[in-house]
Amino acid sequence: MEKALATVILVAATLVLIGLTIFSDDGTFGDAKTQKDRAHAINNSVTIPTQLP
């Protein structure tokens, strides 16, 4: 009984992750292009000091 319950939970978690990946709107689990665009946006908006004051 425990193995059956564990299998059902595992299958449900897999389906949830697949759903988040396919139907993501904000790019959290988006495709490669979405991730690349987000990385460039972060890269262009974050400044890193090159020298301590």
Image (cartoon, rainbow, N blue to C red):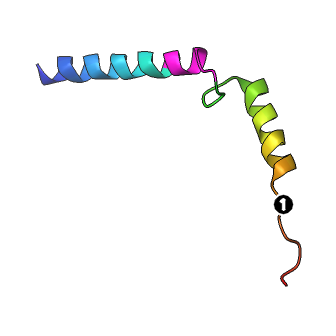
Q: Which residue is mark 1?
A: 47
The residue carrying pointer 1 sits among few (fewer than 14), some (14 to 19) or many (20 or more) residues within 10 Å by Cα, namely: few
Q: Amino acid at mark 1?
A: Thr
Residue 49 lies in the magenta stretch = no
From the viewer's perspective, tell me whether residue 47 is left or right of residue 15: right
Seen from the viewer's position, the closer of residues 15 and 45 is 45
Residue 21 lies in the magenta stretch = yes
Q: Is residue 50 above or below residue 25?
A: below
User: How far across and down, in percent of the image, does residue 26 sit?
Assistant: 64, 27
Q: Quadrant of the C terminus?
A: bottom right
Q: Give the main secondary structure, helix, strand or loop, of the magenta stretch.
A: helix
Question: Which quarter of the picture shows residue 52?
Answer: bottom right
From the viewer's perspective, tell me whether residue 29 is left or right of residue 2: right
Seen from the viewer's position, the closer of residues 5 and 36 is 36
Q: Residue at x 61, y 31 (%)?
A: 28
Q: Which residues are magenta?
A: 18-25
Question: Which quarter of the picture shows residue 1?
Answer: top left
From the viewer's perspective, tell me whether residue 11 is left or right of residue 45: left
User: How far across and down, in percent of the image, does residue 47 sit?
Assistant: 84, 60
